[in-house]
Amino acid sequence: MTQKATRPIQSDETLLSILEALETATEPSIGDLAKKVGVSKSTVHNHLSTLRQHGYVVKGDRGYKLSLRFLELGESVRMDTEIYDVARQHVDALSQETQLLGNIAVEEHGRGVYLYRTRVDDGVQLSTRAGEVHELHCTATGKAILAQLSTERVESILKMHGLPGLSENTITDREELFAELQQIRERGVAFDDEEYGKGLRCVGVPILDQGGVVIGAISVSGPATELVDEKYSSEIPNILQQISNRIELNLRNY
């Protein structure tokens, strides 16, 4: 949930609902979209015609789909994000060194967004989708970011999104979360011990700007059966802290 508009424009809300429906469906028809959005077929048709005219929607063999224009927009937004340009090469090297999935994430509207994800060919099928949105309280990057925010900001995020449980290990208690965030601030590293999903572990560290303000986080993820013992508790965290230091130094000269 984001901040509500004081005077929302109904036609804009309908348009956005159609775009969101196109994102989650596979080439839906006008009728499919009308049913999902809850408006008439003629309304959907008019919006689609406008979107097609401006190159944002294409008509496939079975129905409509978003065009690659959104890829251009997304990449433009990503390239304008300072941490992405500076941290990407370091995360690539991190992934190669650890043979784990590397991540760059930022916070937006109280949730985490993966700006970049790189993987190695290890045969393990993990999501590598850039742009994927996740809750902050159950991922290593998310908790690394939360630990650097003010108590007031964390409270506002919890008010917006709560503490939904994604696995049996997810922290769903407010006091437990704040105790965890204090530990992260002290050790400088965040752990996701199968909290986002069973069988997956992750280690993350925050990235701070020159003024000490958190602008994102980097992490590595992998099977819980591989991230064990000292590799999970000290080896990977040490590597991450070294790389985060390099990124922060480069950011000062960016």
Image (tube, rainbow, N blue to C red):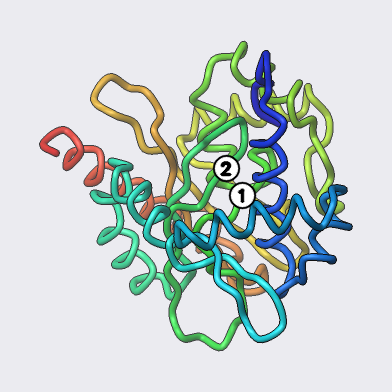
The spot of residue 125 in percent (x, y) is 62, 80
> Looking at the rendering, which quadrant does residue 109 occupy?
top right
Viewer-proximal residue, 5 or 110? Answer: 5
The spot of residue 196 in percent (x, y) is 71, 54
Q: Residues within 10 Å of mark 1 (few under 14, many from 20)?
A: some
Q: Is residue 165 left or right of residue 231?
A: right
Give the numbered dot on residue 60: none
Q: CA distance from mark 1 to mark 2?
A: 6 Å
Picture quarter with the N terminus: top right
The spot of residue 38 in percent (x, y) is 87, 48
Viewer-proximal residue, 188 or 136? Answer: 136
Q: Is residue 75 left or right of residue 40?
A: left
Picture quarter with the C terminus: top left
The spot of residue 34 in percent (x, y) is 83, 57
Kindly indicate whether the residue at mark 2 contacts the one at mark 1 (C-beta within 8 angstroms).
yes
Q: Is residue 81 above or below residue 120?
A: above
> Looking at the rendering, which quadrant does residue 178 occupy?
top right
The kind of secondary structure element at disc 1 is strand
Residue type at tag 2: Gly
| Residue for badge 1 | 133
Q: Is residue 127 above or below residue 179?
A: below
Mark earlier in primary sequence (1, 2): 2
| Residue for badge 2 | 112
The residue that appears at 58% across and 56% down in the rendered structure is: 132
The residue that appears at 53% across and 45% down in the rendered structure is: 141
The kind of secondary structure element at disc 2 is strand
The residue that appears at 18% across and 38% down in the rendered structure is: 249
